Image: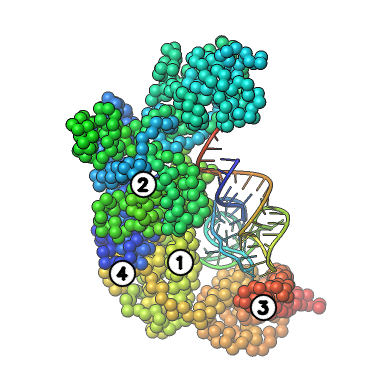
RNA sequence: GGGCGCGUAGCUCAGCGGUAGAGCACCACGUUGACAUCGUGGGGGUCACAGGUUCGAUCCCUGUCGCGCCCACCA
């Protein structure tokens, strides 16, 4: 006998082990149709947060669903080496344990420590994914720094370089002074900070012109003035027309710089003149390039003032310190023309949080604009389809404005760039040092020492190859053939640019096919204020703690049920609790079945069921199965979950199990046996349908129920999805049972309104009921009595003197007057109902008398309206009659 | 500045042109009955606002107001 509740804590670990041991999560070699999902590889430093929980729940739902549908399913699992994040963690660890710093250790030794860290503490998230119930083939786990994946990275780099799609360039990059590395545009976040704007006067070098002796510029970053190469004004700006081409003497540096004309300055803003600092500002860089203006770098890798263009007294100062000193000097020189407070949006490193400096450095770039062309076209042609569709716009928007992708990072942890330099700086890009040497020898005609590029690649470079590198590429493996292009990508919108777009580019370039057919973009799980959950904000909900408290099934079902399209998820505990209760409800329904010997019977053929109630539930089950299937195919997880919730609780538990109680306790052995088997069959279907969402409780029930009926020879995870073949829907049975449900519901409402004590049966007389109704009432009298505690009798005659009649379902009911009824309240209710019906009838008739409606609305809609009028009119007549009688009874003087 | 989205019951939210929905909360009644992690019933909404399209709009279009996100930029 089952306990009264399911115990997730005791059960989950056992089932995780059982699934793994069964091999059920490996692709089925016999199945012809392939289905593959690539996990968005979590960072090796990561721990499971609620976003992972959502993301992986949805993937697991799909994976279990498709597996049960008989496909050969590969859920490719793995981890990302997460360059900056991991290096940060290990460096912090070193600092905490009083070790040497990264630089003191040296590159080789530091990397050893990182690998050691990875072996020990990395990948904790893998076990946490298992706790969530993820049914992946764990034996195929990959890591972006695996030898195989690293080889793929090298091959891709070399190939793209050979094709001219990777190149080295000296230009302005986003520089993170904390990690001392370049980062890509995407890794920069703009934040508003309070700042100031200063106005400086730059004196004209050759004295006053037309009485003007200086030109005023505005800056929020005075320290960069040391690197000014020009002052720009708009060509149409009359104020400066006569100054264009003149020189100004840059204060402090005493360099002479020209006044140039360019479209960039906005004459409306400030003085209309802009200082041009090509080495420290992206806009200025463009202007300087256009005009061949010199660039003067002012900072070292830690963003301290340094270099030839920085006077001795500022050398080594932090740029903010230098800023104050420069402003002071300008003021002393009498050239400060004003200061005002100003909110500035400042770039920050998304990992380091420090202010990013634009710096002039040499880096490796991927020609993203070129690769984006096919990647954009693929979505336009529908080779890959976003769900929800609106994300395609976001994708296009970015792809059409894409900048070259800076892929080199001045870090140690990552894929080292496969480029070697000869003594004269000649670059040899090759898949290995040996290969580079061979090429170099040919180039130089002799062996020359080569040094490898110090830099590593952006983490997202290897992630971009994930859909094919994990399948064995560049080798032509059977997996690659079978699973590429993959079926569905499930991910959050926050990494559409970082990851999805780049996988599209790389996949299309190297595989000539899109990496995935469907891209399902889910919402972000946010905190109550609608903010992104983040460790730094301290607003995270820990999924593992939620699993401890409510069980993994409850968390999974909640996430799936809330994964509606188009809105962020605000997770609430009461909701999880509610779905935990749903599990308990299912558990107890199974317990009821077990107590009543509703045991699994393999030979049971639902098509042969005779009892109306059984035929009805079989039809309802098929309807539910179809709904769940359709919704899942369209990635409407919430709809699928809701359909299941309603079917299990409101149909199976609330009605079916109640309706069969008399049969199970009755004398008709044939009916009893059929009912037991039908109940078992239905429960069996429910377990299958629910399994993708709640794998633990369903698997456990599957096994436990099997202990009593026929023995199960397979785990539920290996079972097949319910057969959706038609022929099981039985309209007649459905109509009859729905009639009972209506009757019971309405009678119950009536009882409540009449304030009848719960134990009391009340006699009701049906007046003028037709024969079919009488037969039905007769047949289901016990049931109706049980469920509503009403004893009906029927009469073909009119209602007895002094009783009130009213409508119940399709029957007219007479209520003897000596009850405990609040007639006034009842009269009010009836009057309200009559009024409602009147307005409905008027409304519907108005529609019907509109010739356009009749002509143009679909036929079935018009018919529906006609029926509605008829139905409402009959009902209204009955109610009005009852109301009249009631009023008469209330007021005998009439 | 450009783009995307959201305003539906007290709360959290579904809703795929055809009589407005769920869960929670609330009120009433109910417990030796598979389940109090429960059951039955009930109250509660001019679907943000204004126009338009349509026989018919919560749904499509336009505008307004409020809120959120993304991208770019502010010398």
Q: Is residue A53 visible?
A: no
| Residue highlighted by disc 4 | A706
**Nearest the camera: B37 or A474?**
A474
| Residue highlighted by disc 2 | A464
Rounded to the nearest whole Å, what is the CA distance between mark 4 and mark 2?
A: 46 Å
Rounded to the nearest whole Å, what is the CA distance between mark 4 and mark 1?
A: 29 Å
| Residue highlighted by disc 3 | A866
- Of marks 4 and 1, the one in the foreground: 1
Rounded to the nearest whole Å, what is the CA distance between mark 2 and mark 1?
A: 32 Å
| Residue highlighted by disc 1 | A630
Task: Name which residue lies at 45% across and 66% down.
Answer: A630
Q: Do tags 2 and 3 sit on the same chain?
A: yes
Marks 4/3 in contact by CB < 8 Å: the verdict is no
> Can you say whether A794 is above or below A47 in the image?
below
Q: Do tags 4 and 2 sit on the same chain?
A: yes
Q: Earlier in the sequence, mark 4 or mark 3?
A: 4
Task: Name which residue lies at 45% across and 26% down.
Answer: A279
- Of marks 4 and 2, the one in the foreground: 2
Rounded to the nearest whole Å, what is the CA distance between mark 2 and mark 3?
A: 60 Å
Chain of the residue under label 3: A
> Can you say whether A52 is above or below A409 in the image?
below
Quarter occupied by the N terminus of chain A: bottom left
Marks 2/1 in contact by CB < 8 Å: the verdict is no
Q: Quadrant of residue A837?
A: bottom right
Marks 2/3 in contact by CB < 8 Å: the verdict is no
Image location of residue A354, percent across then percent down: 44, 30
């Amino acid at each position: 006998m089952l306990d009264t509740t399911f115990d997730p804590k005791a059960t989950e670990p056992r089932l995780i082990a059982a699934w793994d041991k069964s091999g059920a999560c490996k692709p089925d070699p016999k199945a012809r149709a392939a289905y593959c999902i690539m996990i968005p590889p979590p960072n090796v430093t990561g721990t499971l947060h609620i976003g992972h929980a959502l993301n992986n729940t949805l993937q697991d739902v799909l994976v279990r669903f498709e597996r049960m549908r008989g496909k050969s399913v590969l859920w490719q699992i793995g981890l990302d080496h997460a360059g900056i994040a991991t290096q940060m963690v290990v460096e912090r660890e070193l600092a905490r344990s009083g070790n040497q710093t990264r630089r003191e250790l040296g590159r080789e030794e530091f990397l050893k420590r990182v690998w050691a860290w990875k072996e020990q503490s990395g990948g904790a998230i893998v076990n946490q994914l298992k706790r969530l119930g993820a049914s992946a083939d764990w034996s195929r786990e990959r890591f972006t720094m695996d030898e195989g994946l690293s080889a793929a990275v090298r091959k891709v780099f070399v190939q793209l370089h050979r094709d001219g799609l990777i190149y080295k360039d000296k230009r302005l990059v986003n520089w993170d002074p904390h990690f001392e590395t370049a980062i890509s545009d995407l890794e920069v976040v703009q934040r508003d900070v309070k700042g100031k704007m200063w106005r400086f006067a730059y004196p004209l070098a050759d004295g006053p012109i037309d009485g003007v002796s200086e030109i005023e510029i505005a800056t929020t970053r005075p320290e960069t003035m040391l690197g000014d190469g020009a002052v720009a004004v708009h060509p149409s700006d009359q104020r400066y027309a006569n100054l264009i081409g003149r020189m100004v003497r840059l204060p402090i540096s005493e360099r002479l710089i020209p006044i140039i004309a360019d479209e960039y300055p906005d004459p409306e803003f400030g003085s209309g003149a802009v200082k041009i600092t090509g080495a420290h500002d992206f806009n200025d860089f463009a202007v300087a390039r256009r005009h061949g203006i010199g660039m003067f770098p002012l900072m070292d890798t830690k963003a301290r003032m340094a270099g030839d263009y920085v006077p001795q007294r500022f050398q080594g100062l932090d740029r903010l310190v230098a800023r104050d000193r420069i402003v002071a000097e300008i003021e002393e020189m009498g050239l400060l023309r004003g200061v005002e407070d100003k909110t500035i949006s400042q770039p920050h490193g998304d990992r380091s949080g420090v202010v990013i400096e634009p710096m002039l450095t040499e880096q490796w770039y991927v020609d993203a604009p070129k690769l984006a062309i096919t990647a954009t076209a693929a979505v336009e042609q529908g080779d890959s389809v976003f769900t929800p569709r609106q994300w395609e716009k976001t994708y296009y928007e970015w792809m059409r404005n894409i900048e070259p992708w800076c892929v080199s990072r001045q870090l140690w942890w990552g894929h080292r760039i496969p480029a070697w330099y000869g003594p004269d700086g000649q670059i040899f890009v090759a898949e290995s040092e040996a290969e580079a040497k061979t090429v170099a020898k040919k180039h130089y005609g002799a062996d020359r020492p080569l040094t490898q590029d110090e830099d590593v690649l952006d983490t997202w470079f290897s992630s971009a190859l994930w859909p094919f590198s994990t399948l064995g590429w560049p080798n032509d493996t059977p997996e690659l053939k079978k699973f590429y292009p993959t079926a569905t990508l499930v991910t959050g919108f926050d990494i559409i640019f970082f990851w999805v777009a780049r996988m599209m580019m790389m996949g299309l370039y190297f595989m000539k096919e899109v990496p995935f057919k469907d891209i399902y973009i889910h919402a972000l799980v946010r905190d109550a204020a609608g903010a992104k959950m983040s460790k730094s904000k301290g607003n995270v909900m820990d999924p593992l703690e939620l699993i401890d408290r409510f069980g993994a099934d409850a968390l999974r079902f909640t996430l799936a049920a809330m994964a509606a399209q188009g809105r962020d998820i605000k997770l609430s505990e009461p909701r999880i609790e509610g779905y935990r209760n749903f599990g308990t409800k299912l558990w107890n329904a199974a317990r009821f079945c077990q107590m009543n010997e509703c045991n699994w019977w393999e030979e049971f053929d639902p098509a042969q069921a005779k009892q109306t109630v059984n035929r009805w539930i079989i039809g309802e089950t098929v309807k539910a199965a179809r709904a769940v299937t359709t919704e899942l195919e369209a990635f409407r997880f919430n709809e699928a979950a809701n359909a299941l919730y309603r079917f299990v609780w409101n149909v199976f538990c609330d009605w079916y199990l109640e309706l069969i109680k008399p049969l199970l306790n009755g004398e008709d052995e044939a009916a009893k046996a059929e009912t037991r088997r039908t109940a078992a069959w239905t429960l069996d279907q429910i377990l299958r349908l629910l399994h993708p969402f709640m794998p633990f409780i369903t698997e456990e029930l599957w096994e436990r129920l099997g202990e009593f009926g026929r023995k199960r020879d397979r785990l539920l995870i290996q079972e097949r999805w319910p057969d959706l073949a038609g022929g099981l829907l039985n309209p007649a049975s459905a109509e009859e049972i729905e009639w009972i449900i209506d009757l019971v519901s309405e009678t119950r409402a009536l009882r409540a309104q009449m304030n009848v004590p719960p134990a009391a049966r009340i006699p009701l007389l049906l007046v003028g009921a037709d024969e079919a109704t009488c037969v039905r009432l007769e047949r289901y009298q016990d049931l109706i009595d049980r469920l509503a505690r009403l004893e009906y009798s029927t009469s073909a005659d009119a209602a007895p003197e002094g009783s009130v009649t009213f409508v119940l379902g399709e029957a007219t009911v007479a209520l003897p007057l000596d009850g405990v009824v609040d007639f006034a309240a009842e009269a009010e209710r009836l009057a309200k109902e009559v009024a409602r019906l009147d307005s409905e009838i008027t409304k519907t008739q108005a529609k019907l008398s509109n010739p356009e409606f009749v002509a143009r609305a679909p036929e079935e809609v018009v018919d529906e309206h006609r029926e509605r009028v008829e139905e409402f009119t009959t009902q209204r007549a009955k109610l009005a009659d009852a109301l009249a009688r009631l009023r008469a009874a209330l007021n005998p003087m009439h």
